[in-house]
Amino acid sequence: MSTAIRPNPSAGGSNSDARLPGGDAHAEAPTTLTERVPRTLGLLDQFGFWGNLGVSLLGFSGAIAILAPYGVKPLTFGAAVMATVVGSALGGLILGATLVLGPKTGAPAMVILRGVLGARASIVPTVFNIAQCLGWAVFELVVISTGLRALTHDHVPRWLCLVVAGAVTTGLTIWPLGWIRSLRKYVSVLVVAALVVLAFGLLRNPVPHLAGSWQGFWLAVDAAVALTISWVPLGADYSRHSRSARSAFAGGFLGYGVTQVACLVVGLVALAQVAQDGNKIFDLFIGLPLGTIAFAVLVIRETDQSFANVYSTAMSIQNLRPNVDRRILTVAIGILITVLALTININDYANFLYLIGAVFVPMSGVLVAVWWRTRGESLDLSESAPTRPAMLGAWLVGFVVYQLINPGSLAHWSSFWTTASTHLHTAGHTWLSASVTSFAVALLLALPFARVALCPSRGGQPDRP
């Protein structure tokens, strides 16, 4: 028996950016996909949520991918900052455009893919998204526990830090909209203050001169774009509660983009001061004036990252099982990631996670094509939505393009693509961005067919341009 997704009351109308019904200002997210979706998050809520996600403990040390792209000379400090700004702006535009589909449809991200790819075909990216969300949730618990141990000078056992981080993460997912509203009211100001404290503390000393070049500029841009686009397969899980499409877009483009730039620039300065040794960054922060307090704020607040990954895992599972209570799912997922964090070496999983991320870069291009051509009006999100071969083809070609430009480093898988790219002379070009190119290819291929995602009564056509 087919399960109906409650439609967005404003979808299909001419006022495509009208404010959506808000209802109870303290309403929580529905427990299943068959319940009505409350529209209670305003512009400031979107800014607070996405702005906080733009700041990550992983981002500080991860800035090394921008400062020293793999396979080329490190960038000068100025080139790295410019790459951060350009990449965050491009990624923010893509993220913001895909977030608009949330309030337009009222559906989570993986359910929207029913209308884009077809109900059965949406299972493929859903499984990938579950895998990546679980992996990154485990990563975040490890990072939080590392931060807590740094604050206590390793006096607290690692297992206890992981259990506490997992318990807090799981608790936040029970009341997701309440947590997002709290981020806006209380946490955002503390995070901004913490970044200011760290920035001023680091800039007391001149930034060491970095001998480098602009040769890897576009590779660094690629890394910054990929960081932002990694949130695309999760975005509509939260933007569907937005009161307007404009506030959803602004939250992703400005809220996330600005704070990601701030986070990465602080990371770049810190890396320059510790000779690019990311393992020393936490100790550097704690040693700054008021640094312990600022770092403690960021460690505690890092639970918004693990929260988002756990909650979106549940939303993805609901695309497969719409009637399962999300609270049951998130409690089970919270226990699972805590056990995994306690028992496995998550670093062995990293290369696979980056490969999954590459899957969603061209998917973002397909999503933007659908938004461009349909504005999200009356997408067919039913469990009987037909498969869209043209859209699947655009996604697949975009993924192949990404692999040919950046084969990655996953054992066995990468060797095939390295051989193919060598024969085709597609790899090793420092001016060529895998993220930007694969996104553009998927977008251009999907555009002529994007209106097929509409319900037949709203103008959906067979798969031809």
Image (cartoon, grey):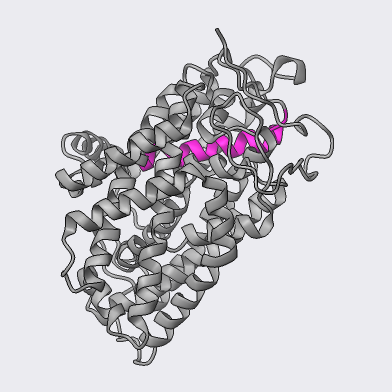
Q: How many marks?
A: 0
- Most distant residue in the top direction: 1
Measured from the top left, where is residue 132 in percent x and y? 34, 39
Residue sitting at the far right: 14
- For the residue pair 382 and 77, the one nearer the viewer reads as 382
Residue 241 lies, with reference to residue 276, above or below; the image says: above
Residue drawn 55% across and 34% down?
A: 108
Q: Indicate the position of residue 187 as horizontal and vertical percent values.
A: 51, 66
Confirm whether residue 407 shows in the render: no
**Whole-percent x, y for residue 21 in the image:** 76, 40
Foreground of the two, 127 or 92: 127
Between residue 364 and residue 164, name the one nearer to us.
164
The quarter of the picture where the N terminus appears is: top right
Rendered residue at 18%/47% (across/down): 342
Quarter of the image for the C terminus: give it.
top right
**Looking at the magenta stretch, what is its main secondary structure?**
helix
Residue 286 located left or right of residue 301: left
Q: Residue at x 42, y 77 (%)?
A: 78
Answer with left or right where residue 182 lies relative to residue 24: left
Magenta stretch holds residue 362? yes
Instruction: Name the image quarter holding residue 39.
Output: top right
Left or right placement of residue 68 versus residue 374 in this view: left
Q: Give the quadrant of residue 4.
A: top right
> Which residue range is magenta in the image?
357-377
Front residue of 358 and 437: 358
